[in-house]
């Protein structure tokens, strides 16, 4: 007897339907076909132990399991539950009241029949709705994630027995319904870190406000203990709230990577990822034999913070150059090519030298001649070219630390950022792939960033006197446009341009001595 149901495989951030067919007939042996990896093939032992635990029998006949289409590789342990149910139906131990082929069924079985959570539930649920299935039977721990998608029956089951009784119509399990949108809108402003907790550093806060308003990348240079990390962690709280489409796309990436917690629903806050400097190339941009998203994709629609930037391996930093420009990463393998979105704000920090005290107002740098420049040269010019703001961070004085004056809160800064982003949305409404000033290509920069004769004279003088490189030109114009947006000005004024020029520290000749 043939039994058939459906599962799914995730490739990139999208899912594809997999048909699971089982026959039990004359002969002996367990055969699995359809390009299954080791984890899928090992399901035989997990399925057999689970069936015996609940009093069912593993047929001592020839069992053939086919995973179709047969030319697509399947991996992972999420096919245990549908294989077990099909074996029961094919061996006539299960007479389901509900048809197996009306549902997509996924779940990993433990030896006592309890279902373990799986990865990639959200893209699978989206595909279930698109294909017109009645529902999705899955582990209870993943049910809230699947319930993000409406118009399908999400059936949460704790054990193999729960799935059997549901299909036989003997269970009281009802489809899970969660008002994810209400939950999303009530938690999207819930950030534990606030700029009001930071005393002093007003110039750095201003630079980070400009970065958030225009989506610009930032590097902060300063001695140890000057507050670089503390400031960086508060940036998500001043970015505009996630929209529902952004939240759905972000949640899909975290679902595929298995980063969503138990009973997780839509990601409501902008991601903040801070990998250690020992990270590998593949862990940062994504990869592996079966490609998974890396840190830059997990930071999609949020912030990627690289602390102590020169300590990262040069090869790791160089693989970021293309994703920074294209806002996505493409990973090609012999049998597949996947694409992960990677539209993030890069926030980097570094000490000015190995000892950390170059240009310190009180402490003397002990680094030898040329050491500071050598340390800075660990960051390549092409990478610095993609960072719009270079900000020098100085230590906070005792008077500032001990001050009882209430600092400006993140919500006040965020309100200004949102207004500036609204101006950019209106400006780029005819451009589908441009959402902020930082994303402007050179041809749009010339059209949008008109600075007049006086501004052109100031910029020419700055480039000559300060020794700014040619790559600083476009960056200064983009940042000055953002400063004008924050000031709610239609035109870039001289004061906007002069402030933008201040944020190119590392482009100055002889900055490192």
Image (tube, rainbow, N blue to C red):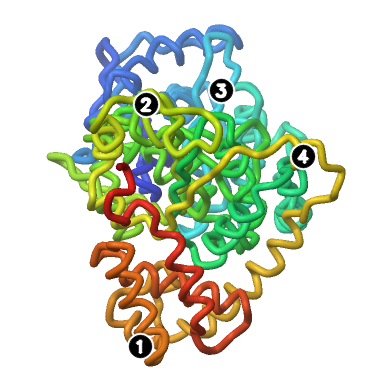
Q: Is residue 181 visible?
A: yes
**Which residue lies under the disc numbered 4?**
399
Answer whether labels 1 and 2 touch (C-beta < 8 Å).
no
The residue tagged with tag 3: helix, strand or loop? strand
Cα separation, mark 4 vs mark 2, equals 28 Å
**Which residue lies under the disc numbered 2?**
354
Q: Quadrant of the C terminus?
A: top left
Task: Kindly identify the residue that appears in the image at 57 percent across and 15 percent down.
Answer: 113
Task: Kindly identify the residue that appears in the image at 75 percent across and 42 percent down.
Answer: 400
Q: Is residue 125 visible?
A: no
**Which residue lies under the disc numbered 3?**
116
Q: Earlier in the sequence, mark 1 or mark 4?
A: 4
Q: Earlier in the sequence, mark 4 or mark 2?
A: 2
From the viewer's perspective, is the residue at label 1 or at label 3 nearer? 1
Query: Which mark, by number, is residue 247?
Result: none
How crowded pointer 1 is (Cα within 10 Å; few <14, some 14-19, many 20+) is rated as few
Task: Kindly identify the residue that appears in the image at 39 percent across and 54 percent down.
Answer: 505
Query: Which mark, by number, is residue 447?
Result: 1
How crowded pointer 3 is (Cα within 10 Å; few <14, some 14-19, many 20+) is rated as some
The residue tagged with tag 4: helix, strand or loop? helix
Horizontal relation, residue 238 to residue 44: left or right: right
Cα separation, mark 1 vs mark 4, equals 46 Å
């Amino acid at each position: 007897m043939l039994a058939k149901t459906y599962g799914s495989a995730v490739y990139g951030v999208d899912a594809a339907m997999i048909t699971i067919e089982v026959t039990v007939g004359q002969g002996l042996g367990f055969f699995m076909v359809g390009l299954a990896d080791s984890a899928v093939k090992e399901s035989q032992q997990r399925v057999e132990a689970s069936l015996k635990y609940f009093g069912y029998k593993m047929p001592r006949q020839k069992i053939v399991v086919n995973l179709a289409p047969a030319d697509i590789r399947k991996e992972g342990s999420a096919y245990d539950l549908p294989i077990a149910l099909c074996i029961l139906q094919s061996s006539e131990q299960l007479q389901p009241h509900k048809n197996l082929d009306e549902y997509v069924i996924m779940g990993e079985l433990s030896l006592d029949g309890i279902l373990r959570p799986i990865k990639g539930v959200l893209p699978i649920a989206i595909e279930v709705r698109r294909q017109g299935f009645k529902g999705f039977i899955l582990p209870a721990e993943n049910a809230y994630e699947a319930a993000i998608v409406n118009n399908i029956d999400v059936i949460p089951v704790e054990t193999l027995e729960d799935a059997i009784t549901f299909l036989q119509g003997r269970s009281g399990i009802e489809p899970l319904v969660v008002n994810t949108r209400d939950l999303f809108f009530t938690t999207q402003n819930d950030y534990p870190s606030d700029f009001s907790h930071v005393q002093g550093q007003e110039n750095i806060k201003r630079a980070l406000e400009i970065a958030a308003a225009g989506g610009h990348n930032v590097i902060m240079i300063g001695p140890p203990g000057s507050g670089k990390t503390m400031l960086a962690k508060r940036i998500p709280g001043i970015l505009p709230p996630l929209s529902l489409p952004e939240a759905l796309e972000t949640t899909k990436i975290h679902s595929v990577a298995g980063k969503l917690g138990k009973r997780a629903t839509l990601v409501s806050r902008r991601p903040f990822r801070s990998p250690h400097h020992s990270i590998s190339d593949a862990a940062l941009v994504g990869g592996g034999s079966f490609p998974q998203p890396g840190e830059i994709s997990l930071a999609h629609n949020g912030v990627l913070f690289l602390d102590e930037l020169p300590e990262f391996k040069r090869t790791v930093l160089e693989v970021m150059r293309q994703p920074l420009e294209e806002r996505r990463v493409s990973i090609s393998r012999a049998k597949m090519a996947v694409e992960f979105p990677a539209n993030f704000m890069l926030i980097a920090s570094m000490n000015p030298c190995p000892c950390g005290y170059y240009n310190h107002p009180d402490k003397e740098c002990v680094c030898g001649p040329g050491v500071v420049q050598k340390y800075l040269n660990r960051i390549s010019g092409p990478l610095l070219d993609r960072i719009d703001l270079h900000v020098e961070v100085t230590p906070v004085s005792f008077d500032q630390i001990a001050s009882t004056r209430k600092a400006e809160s993140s919500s006040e800064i965020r309100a200004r950022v949102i207004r500036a982003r609204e101006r950019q949305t209106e400006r780029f409404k005819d451009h589908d792939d441009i959402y902020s000033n930082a994303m402007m290509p050179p041809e749009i920069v010339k059209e949008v960033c008109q600075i007049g004769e006086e501004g052109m004279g100031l910029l020419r003088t700055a480039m000559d006197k300060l020794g700014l490189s040619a790559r600083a030109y476009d960056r200064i114009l983009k940042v000055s446009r953002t400063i004008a947006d924050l000031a709610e000005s239609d035109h870039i004024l001289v004061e906007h341009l002069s402030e933008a020029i201040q944020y190119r520290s590392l482009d100055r000749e002889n900055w490192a001595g």
